[in-house]
Amino acid sequence: MQKLLITGGKRLAGDIAISGAKNAALPILCAGLLTADTVQLSNVPRLQDVATMLKLLRQMGLRAEEEGDRIALNGGRIDKLEAPYEMVKTMRAAILVLGPLVARFGEARVSLPGGCAIGSRPVDQHIKGLRAMGAEIQIEAGYIHARAKKLRGARIVTDMITVTGTENLLMAATLAEGETVLENAAREPEVTDLANLLVAMGAQISGIGTDRLVIQGVPSLHGASHAVIPDRVETATFLCAVAAAGGDVTLTNVRTDILDVALDKLREAGVVLTSGPDWIRAQMAARPKAVSFRTTEYPGFPTDMQAQFMALNCIAEGNSRVTETIFENRFMHVQEMNRLGACIGIEGHTAIIEGVPQLVGAPVMATDLRASASLVIAGLAARGETLVDRIYHLDRGYDRMEVKLCAVGADIQRVNG
């Protein structure tokens, strides 16, 4: 099993190109199921989750031709309407084939999903929405089996804000008969990116970027070309790395307009930020200042950045409080950070962090995708060597992270054992 060996204490300097957004690419790949025409995608990140999704879609009969960061999808020969357990168990986003399959083909059999062990993340809102649109759904032997001769438009109010639920129902609604209104819809930029692709494919959607999406169903969708938005989480992760390790790094291919809350917190921590239309420069020459925050849905502080900012707080001047409101099990990185000498206590859904001047390298284990990134950041700031185990979590969502960090001066090796 591969691990990352990090020798900390190296300041970072240089340029890093940000990849396309994982959380946008995965639903966008599933949108290829909605048409028999070709969908041309660019800026697709090279990630394990993307490879897994493509393997699943190809198994269904979708043709996918890859060339660098470009992928051409063609759904003209879909012949298998099932997402089996062995394909879904490692990647929760596979649930996103459910809506497109039922909408276009009238049936889908999708295994209940797996993914990171950060909380239950139930799919009941997906099921509730599809039932409101007329689908008959049974849960049997660990599978969701959905059937509908023709989905019908409906007004759907989800019990909670759910990103994948919004995306699944949005895709299903594009081919439903009549008008669908999604209330309490997720507003994340990745949802907006999916909606913009669907419009390019001929969907009729209004309210994009708001919590109320109105979709007028159309008989069919056609092909389109689309560039996946830059990954805001990868961007903020590297900014946290500069804040923790110190240095002067410019990130290119970025969207600063979807990073407001994270950038505000980085400035509060003492990072000097300057930016242009598609770049941002981070300069850090001192110990960071502690920042407190509470995770919430977009446009609030993203749960996907909680662990990385906690790594920053571990070595910050002062104390901080981090409250997690989205996932109940997303503090599993705390005990690993404490192994590095951090001083973190947990009270319910809140972590209390007392900043220490220096972390010390040690063997640690990644427990989920964003936790693995936080341990890399902590290792960059620690004295001595940090060995991060289970980095397959990292490869699910970061495009060659250690390669990009080494290019700006980090000392990271991928090792076997």
Image (cartoon, rainbow, N blue to C red):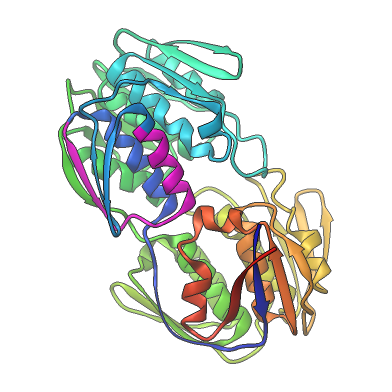
Q: Is residue 48 magenta?
A: yes
Q: Position of residue 72 (x, y in %)?
A: 23, 45
* Left or right of 33, for residue 270: right
Q: Would you place residue 147 above or below residue 205 in this image?
A: above
Q: Which quarter of the rendering shows the C terminus?
A: bottom right
Q: Closest to the observer: 29 or 137?
A: 29
Q: Is residue 202 magenta?
A: no
Q: Closest to the observer: 179 or 85?
A: 85
Q: Position of residue 186 (x, y in %)?
A: 44, 41
Residue 372 sits in quarter = bottom right
Q: Which quarter of the rendering shows the N terminus?
A: bottom right
Residue 269 sits in quarter = bottom right
Q: Residue at x 60, y 75 (%)?
A: 413
Q: Closest to the observer: 305 or 381?
A: 381
Q: Residue at x 33, y 34 (%)?
A: 213
Q: Residue at x 29, y 39 (%)?
A: 207
- Which residues are drawn in magenta? 37-58
* Residue 345 visible in the current orientation: yes
Q: Residue at x 47, y 74 (%)?
A: 404
Q: Position of residue 229 (x, y in %)?
A: 33, 57
